[in-house]
């Protein structure tokens, strides 16, 4: 019986194809990646998304600064002014002085598949234009922003990230940006995260329009609590936890709706609330000024109230 033999030429061809894909992505996006030096000594990465200097980075890179110095791949520098900043999604938009600048395109993160090539470009530890490559490890992760709010639809990759990579692009082999690199697990290997490009596209549009992201506000402080089994059975609840209101801000939407400390929120706008993150997800711009149903447990009773959230 004939034995299968290794075919080095085929292996070389596959390696060349992979290399060509990575090289193409770097050639396409690399010139658009900048190093950002922030007053006070901070630094990170960013990338241009328009020829007139519009660039995206992480909120934590600029740390509340009003401007930074952007260093381009060709060695030139320019002042970059902050247009808008959203710590809750860890994204910021800046504009660098210049025109006809190289720029990258935001792709559709909704079309990303687990296992596809993912290429990170940035400036870790000040080493400019560093490239790492891997694959998309998982989709739809949730990650806690430094503001404490949960970020949804985060991409996980094993492309290595290090301090200084933050704000740089995560790119497909076609040279489309599918994420904004934001974090890694320092004690682990191959656990890196990027904010999805579809999230970035939405946030960028709102920051350009308003300079900030509008969210709605209830005026309560709360904590996650389990719901007693007998209470869950009595009301035929499909959830086992909710948000217990610890305090209500006077003259707030929650106060006007009659909410009280001790109430346990279990639904908002028709969707279950199992914890504070669920409540945050519901407090979007669309709910500002709109009558919204909210369900609470008060003692042994289940009550539905209506609340009109304000703008945060």
Image (cartoon, rainbow, N blue to C red):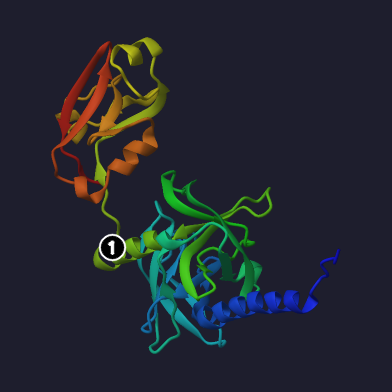
Give above or below for 114 relative to 283. below
On screen, 202 above or below 227?
below
Residue 230's image quarter? Answer: top left
**Which residue is located at x 43 percent, y 64 percent?**
65
Any part of residue 19 in sight: yes
On screen, residue 142 versus residue 233, left or right, reads right
The reply, left or right, for residue 93 in relation to residue 8 is: left
Give percent across and percent down for residue 201: 35, 65
Residue plotted at (64% across, 78% down):
17
Which residue is under mark 1? 206
Element type where label 1 sits in the image: helix
Q: Residue at x 18, y 24 (%)?
A: 304
Tell me where residue 81 appears, x and y as whole percent. Answer: 39, 73
Report the residue that reaches farthest toward the front. 1
Q: Which quarter of the rendered picture does the N terminus lie within?
A: bottom right
User: Which residue is at the front of the view, 82 or 225?
Assistant: 225
Specify the quadrant of the image occupied by residue 109: bottom left
Write the residue at 38% across / 68% down: 93
- Is 284 positioned to the left or the right of 144 in the image? left
Q: Is residue 250 above or below residue 185?
A: above
Residue 72 can be seen in this image: no
Mark 1 is surrounded, within 10 Å at the Cα level, by few (under 14), some (14 to 19) or many (20 or more) other residues, namely some
Residue 56, image x, y percentages? 42, 69
Residue 74, position as x, y percentages in the image: 56, 88
Q: How many marks?
A: 1
Q: Nearer the viewer, residue 257 or 137?
A: 137
């Amino acid at each position: 019986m004939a034995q299968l033999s290794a075919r080095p030429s085929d292996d070389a061809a596959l390696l060349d194809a992979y290399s060509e894909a990575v090289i193409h992505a770097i050639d396409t996006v690399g010139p658009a990646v900048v190093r950002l030096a922030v007053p006070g000594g901070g630094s990170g990465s960013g990338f241009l998304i328009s020829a007139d200097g519009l660039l995206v980075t992480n909120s934590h890179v600029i740390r509340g600064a009003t401007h930074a110095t952007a260093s381009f791949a060709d060695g030139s520098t320019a002042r970059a002014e902050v247009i808008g900043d959203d710590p809750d999604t860890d994204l910021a938009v800046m504009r660098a002085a210049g025109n006809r600048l190289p720029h990258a395109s935001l792709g559709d993160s909704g079309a990303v598949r687990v296992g596809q090539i993912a290429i990170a470009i940035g400036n870790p530890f000040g080493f400019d234009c560093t490239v790492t490559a891997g694959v998309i490890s998982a989709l739809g992760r949730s990650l806690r922003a430094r503001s404490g709010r949960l970020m949804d639809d985060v991409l996980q990759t094993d492309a290595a990230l290090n301090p200084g990579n933050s704000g740089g692009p995560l790119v497909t082999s076609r040279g489309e940006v599918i994420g904004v690199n934001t974090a890694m697990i320092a004690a682990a290997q191959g656990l890196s995260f990027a904010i999805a490009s579809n999230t970035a596209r939405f946030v960028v549009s709102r920051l350009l329009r308003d300079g900030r992201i509008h969210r709605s506000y209830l005026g309560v402080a709360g904590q996650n609590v389990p719901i007693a089994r007998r209470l869950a059975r009595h009301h035929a609840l499909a959830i086992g936890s909710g948000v217990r209101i610890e305090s209500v801000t006077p003259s707030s939407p929650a106060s006007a709706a009659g909410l009280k400390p001790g109430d346990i929120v279990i639904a908002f706008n028709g969707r279950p609330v199992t914890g504070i993150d669920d409540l945050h997800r519901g407090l979007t711009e669309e709910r500002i000024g709109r009558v919204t149903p909210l369900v609470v447990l008060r003692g042994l009773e289940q009550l539905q109230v209506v609340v009109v959230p304000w703008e945060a």
